[in-house]
Amino acid sequence: MSVPISSRVTEEALQHCADEPIAVPGAVQPHGVLLAVTEPDLAVVSASGNAAEVFGAAVLGRTLADLLGPADLAALRDGLAGDLADVNPLRQTVAGEPVDLVLHRRDGLLIGEWEPVAGAEQAPAAWHARLPAVLGRLAQSATVDELTTALARDVRALTGFDRVMVYRFDPEWNGEVVAETRRDDLEPFLGLHYPASDIPAQARELYTRNWLRLIPDARYTPVPLDPPVNPLTGGPLDLSQSVLRSVSPVHLEYLATMGVVASMSVSLVDRGRLWGLISCHGYSGPHRPSYTDRTAAEFLGRTASLLLRTAQEAGDRDRTVEVAQQQARLVAAIGRAPRRPATALVHGGTTVLDLVPAGGAAVRLDGRLHLLGTTPPPERVPELVGALLAAGSPVTDRVPRALPAAGDLADTASGVLAVEVGGGRGDFLAWFRPETLRTVTWGGDPRTTELVEDDGRVRLSPRRSFAAWSETVRGTAEPWRPYEVAAARDLAASLAAGRLDRAEEDDRLAAALQRTLLLESPPDIPGLTLAARYVPSARDVVGGDWYDVVLLPSGRVAVVLGDVAGHGLSAASVTAHLRHALRAGLLRDLGPAAALAALNDLVARLLPGELATAVVAELDPRTGEVAVASAGHVPVLRVGPDGAGWLEVARGPALGLLDEAGFREGRATLSAADRLLLCSDGLLERRGADLADGLEALRAAGAAAGALPAQDLVDRVLAVLDPPDADDVTVVGIALSPAPPPA
Amino acid sequence: MSFDVQHTALREIPVLLVTGELDLLTAPRLAEEVDRALAARPSLLALDLSGTTFLDSSGARQIARSARVAGRSGAVVQVVCPPENHPVRLVFELLSMDSLVAVLPSTDLLGRDCRP
């Protein structure tokens, strides 16, 4: 694999940086003296190069008994008997000057660090008196914002640095300045982001163990340890807990480029993980808070660390409650308008966009897409959501990574939270978040890390330019919180449940209606044999077909077959209307054409926009005479012993097409061997096939059926034509009874 | 073939090219597109069904409704359907749709036959 040169070099430099022995630098900062001694003889086995100067004599090979005054030595020996944390610092006098001695043990050695009191800054005494109030303020912070803001303010009041910031790390260790107090003339850093490489992994690891670092003067010359090894281990002397530890030259360069002269940082650790840092900068010159004040700052950091979890959870809880309230409002709105859930979600006082913070939202219900806010273009939304659902990443804050094909939508949809609305119709709810890092200000460009040659090795040098500039990190959005995802899923579940209820209710109503429309079995009419089959469609429980048999005052019998356009509850209710109206019209006994004309009148006046077809055959069982009228319906087939053919009928327009329509009747006389077949177009319609072919297939099936009785004929044509179950199908067969009653 | 409605124009007459199957499921789409076309207040709106492969009664109902809606806003709807498009043509004939809207064999005749 070929790796570009530049990336190889950077990796090497970063690796070197990560390898840098920051815990064992072999040197200390010059503002104090470090002696490593063995116990109990207190013999010096390693010393910083400035020790002889401070103690007035060479120190290696001597013991602390030789170097310290009797009182100081006694105090030291007392302290060593107990917990060192309780004695630090020990105020001593070295060469006539007061110094603070800080002790710790490491790898079998006692490490002592003497720091002159002169030159250290002291917080006003009043500050320590206010400590209870300071701690109270931290503890009362309701949110992380409040907590970190109070922390920055108090640490600055305590230590007197020019700028105190609170940094927060994201999951990838990029840092963001979340709180800041500073000298008024300084440029604000609040909101700046820093790349993860600014604080390498081994530094973060060290910061988790050692809570405070101080560099009083970043321009210092390191003071080497002599010898830099621990004679007990043979390895380098471990300074990870040392307060004088010399820091990485990379870090010093970093500070120099920022114009920082003095620097201090305190770790913020949440449940064992480095959460962030309190970072203090001094610009005007060396600055060294006293050991006591540093301890107080560390104490504030540790206190805040313990409060972080509570504050974060409190913030989350507030937002969770807010989201839950919005969700409840939306569910209530759907409940008030169960048949128009999309309207409730999109046009209500509270919309889906109010559920969670997002730039835009999409609602697709019953195949119709509604958009709110800033979203990808409507033609791309279903495709984007569908692809994310299919890819198994319906909740993502990195759309371009989850779905490279949607990379061009990163502007409006770097983050997508999508939930399906059950029902198998491809319906969904979705929320979109824009690319947030577009608007983020980075402290320095994380992509242009400079490299310098140092001792022939490639080294990393922090950026020279710290003028904040905007970085476009494509395709990353604010992450979706678990309670936001849960609220979205709950809302979708409410929608699906409501829809299921509604669908069941509709089906029940429509089925009940249709039961009233379809005769259980054709009535027993003397002189006539009637056969009927109704096959419901698979797609909908209820279609718009109906048939009817009406015994007229004249003794004739009207057989009706009709078909209302559409499906479901609305079609069923129109069908009920038409069936009863046509019955009434037929009973006036003015013939089928007049009845259909009256029915068309009714549709035009009472059911505008509906369309239906119907055919009426009036038979006289005594004579075999038949009169047929049709409103746009498929023709009537006459099946005789010699074949099958369409009954000649002058067809009229479908019902509802015209405000006024006239119909004409066709007449024929049936013989005892003739049968008539009436059917709905569901028997004939085929996608991609001609209706004419369907009609011809029906005629051929009738002709081939020969002399079958009516019921067998009906079953035969159904079997032969085998209609698809997309539409409902009705077939009615009529024949004169073998033994007509006497006239 | 998936259903689609495209807005075009011919001699400044707005024409909706209706392709695919016009049925119960797709008729609402046609309704929307007709509404959108009528928003420009044309005096004539053509529905070109040359590319329509299937028409059921719900599709026909929608065409009838569209013609009525257009009529209320002073517009006339004409349908273009060549005789060789049997599946659609036969449904029109069966329902006597030509009693409500002019059904023209080609776009050449658009606007030249305004009989209802």
Image (cartoon, coloured by chain):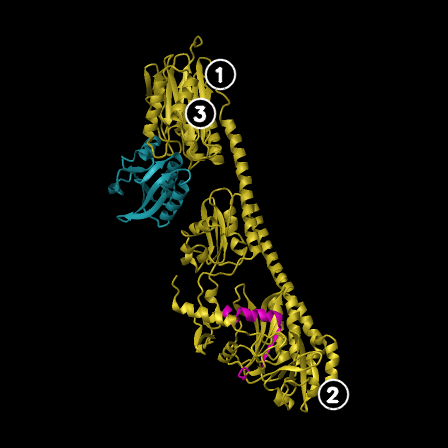
Q: Amino acid at mark 2?
A: Pro
Give the farthest residue toward the left: B108
Q: Residues within 10 Å of mark 2 (few under 14, many from 20)?
A: few
Residue at disc 1, secondary structure: loop
Residue at disc 3, secondary structure: helix
Q: CA distance from mark 2 to mark 3?
A: 128 Å
Q: Report in which chain the residue with disc 1 lies.
A: A
Q: Report in which chain the residue with disc 2 lies.
A: A
The spot of residue A291 in percent (x, y) is 66, 80
Q: Which chain is yellow?
A: A
Q: Is residue A385 visible?
A: yes
Please check whether the numbered discs 1 and 2 fall on a single chain.
Answer: yes
Q: Is residue A587 visible?
A: no
**Numbered label attached to residue A400:** none
Residue A178, quarter of picture:
bottom right
| Relative horizontal placement of residue A668, taking residue A14 as reference (left or right) | left
Q: Amino acid at mark 1?
A: Asp
Residue A375, quarter of picture:
bottom left
The spot of residue B20 in percent (x, y) is 35, 40
Residue for badge 2? A70
User: Which of the pair A565/A535 is nearer the observer?
Assistant: A535
Part of the protein shown in magenta: A196-221
Which colour is chain B painted?
A: cyan
A739 vs A347: above or below: above
Q: Residues within 10 Å of mark 1 (few under 14, many from 20)?
A: few
User: Which of the pair A245/A599 is nearer the observer?
Assistant: A245
Badge count: 3
Task: Name which of mark 1 and mark 2 comes first in the sequence.
Answer: 2
Which quadrant: the C terminus of chain A?
top left
Q: Nearer the viewer, mark 1 or mark 3?
A: 1
User: Which of the pair A54/A196 is nearer the observer?
Assistant: A54
Q: Tags 2 and 3 in contact by the CB under 8 Å rule? A: no
